[in-house]
């Protein structure tokens, strides 16, 4: 009850700054830059997966900031994540996203929103040989 009375809304100066940011068109401009950046990264990731990792299945990206990838039968994404981390590549194992994950779980998520464009293809190139090592 006390918290509700003390923190009823964001501070007025934050609200005014946000309103000014939006009214001057900066928010729309920011969204345009983010959309363009993510589209460029997605295009690079699509091409890198096709070129360097043909054993991986994925739906071509048309938006978003990450890709769902399926490895070949018998591949364990948890093991792949551990092997990849040793190479400086971070992926999210798929079993975290399932109520009852398949065993082994061949699914993983590749985030690319904060990955520099010049690092995406190289990362996939280095990830590809680890897929075979992650088979159980």
Image (tube, rainbow, N blue to C red):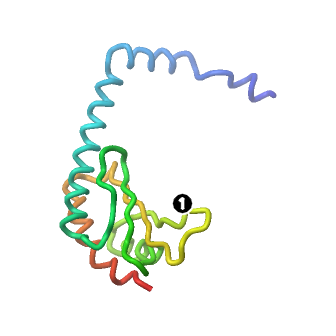
Query: Considering depth in this image, is 40 or 2 the residue closer to the camera?
Result: 40
Q: What residue is rendered at 34% in x and 48% in y?
A: 113
Query: Considering depth in this image, is 55 or 126 the residue closer to the camera?
Result: 55
Which quarter shows the C terminus? bottom left
The percent position of residue 1, horizontal first and vertical second, equals 81, 28
98 horizontally vs 75: left or right: right
Q: What residue is rendered at 33% in x and 50% in y?
A: 114
Tag 1's secondary structure? helix
The part of the image, by quadrant, that contains residue 134 is bottom left
28 horizontally vs 78: left or right: left
Count numbered badges in the picture.
1
97 horizontally vs 26: left or right: right
The percent position of residue 45, horizontal first and vertical second, equals 25, 57
Vertical placement of 125 versus 32: above or below?
Answer: below
The part of the image, by quadrant, that contains residue 115 is bottom left
Q: What residue is rendered at 61% in x and 67% in y?
A: 100
The percent position of residue 40, horizontal first and vertical second, equals 22, 46
Vertical placement of 80 versus 96: above or below?
Answer: below
Farthest bottom residue in view: 136
Residue located beneath label 1 in the image: 97
The part of the image, by quadrant, that contains residue 29 is top left
Q: What residue is rendered at 24% in x and 56% in y?
A: 46
Farthest right residue in view: 1
The percent position of residue 96, horizontal first and vertical second, equals 55, 63
Q: Residues within 10 Å of mark 1 (few under 14, many from 20)?
A: few
Query: Considering depth in this image, is 22 or 136 the residue closer to the camera?
Result: 136
């Amino acid at each position: 009850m006390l918290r509700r009375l003390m923190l009823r809304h964001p501070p007025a100066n934050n609200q005014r700054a946000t309103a000014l940011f939006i009214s001057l068109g900066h928010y729309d401009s920011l969204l345009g830059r983010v959309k363009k950046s993510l589209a460029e990264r997605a295009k690079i990731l699509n091409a890198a997966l096709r070129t360097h990792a043909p054993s991986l299945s994925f739906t071509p990206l048309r938006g978003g900031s990450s890709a769902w990838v399926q490895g070949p039968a018998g591949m364990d994404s948890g093991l792949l994540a551990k092997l990849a981390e040793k190479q400086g590549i971070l992926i999210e194992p798929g079993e975290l996203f399932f109520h009852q994950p398949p065993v082994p779980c061949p699914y993983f998520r590749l985030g690319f929103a904060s990955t520099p464009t010049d690092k995406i293809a190289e990362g996939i190139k280095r990830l590809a040989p680890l897929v075979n090592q992650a088979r159980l």
